[in-house]
Amino acid sequence: MPSPVRLLLPALLPLLSSCTIVSPHRDQAQWTTSVHGVTAHWRWVTPGSLGGVLTTLGHQPENHTTPRYAGTAITLGNTAQCVIDIDPALSRGRLVEVAAHEFGHCAAGRYNKVSLNTAGLDEYHRQLFERYAEHYARLYVEQCGLSLRPLGWFDLTPATCEVAPDPRLIRL
């Protein structure tokens, strides 16, 4: 006579095969960090999927030869939370700069920061709501180097600062 386990095993196999890792939905963070009172929900997105609107710089979503965004940040007003999307293909080789720039947008939203300084910025980054984020990214790289540790990421590259620049204490 077969054991009860042998009889139940065929019934349990379909349940075992359903134990798989499920990718998070588009609107759920893949990882979250908190730095200086700003909580960022980070997400990798499908390469080429960011920048779906016509911008003043001529990006056209249907034209794959025009510039696309390497990252975007979504924050609404004075909130401590934001969502950052990063395109892994377009940020390759510039990931630290892109991540720091997008975190700069989150910090600007959290602490109502705007920069009037356009010195050294290209046409795109001279736009009013791009200035602070770009200056923050440059300051971050200058102070912390090419490590994402100060932004709360796991990174094997050593940082040249203990903490990321505090957006509450700097004027850019």
Image: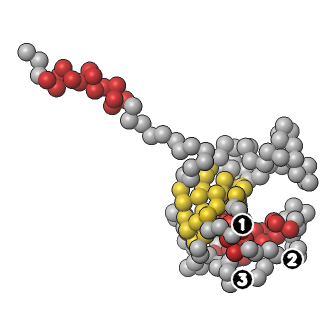
Callout 2, which amino acid? Leu
Image check: 2 left or right of 66?
left
Q: Which residue is mark 3?
A: 170
Quadrant of image for the N terminus: top left
Q: Nearer the viewer, residue 99 or 147?
A: 99
Q: Is residue 29 visible?
A: yes
Sort mark 2 into few (<14), some (14-19) or many (20+) by Cα contacts within 10 Å: few
Residue 41 figure quarter: bottom right
**Image x and y of residue 101, in percent:** 72, 65
Residue 50: x percent and y percent?
74, 47
Tag 3, which secondary structure?
loop
Q: Quadrant of residue 91?
A: bottom right
Give the amino acid type for the residue marked by disc 3 in the picture. Answer: Ile
Identified at 45% across, 40% down, the residue is: 21
- Whether the residues at callouts 3 and 2 have beta carbons within 8 Å, the answer is no
User: Is residue 102 in view from this perspective?
Assistant: no
Q: Which residue is mark 1?
A: 77
Looking at the image, residue 106 lies above or below residue 164: above
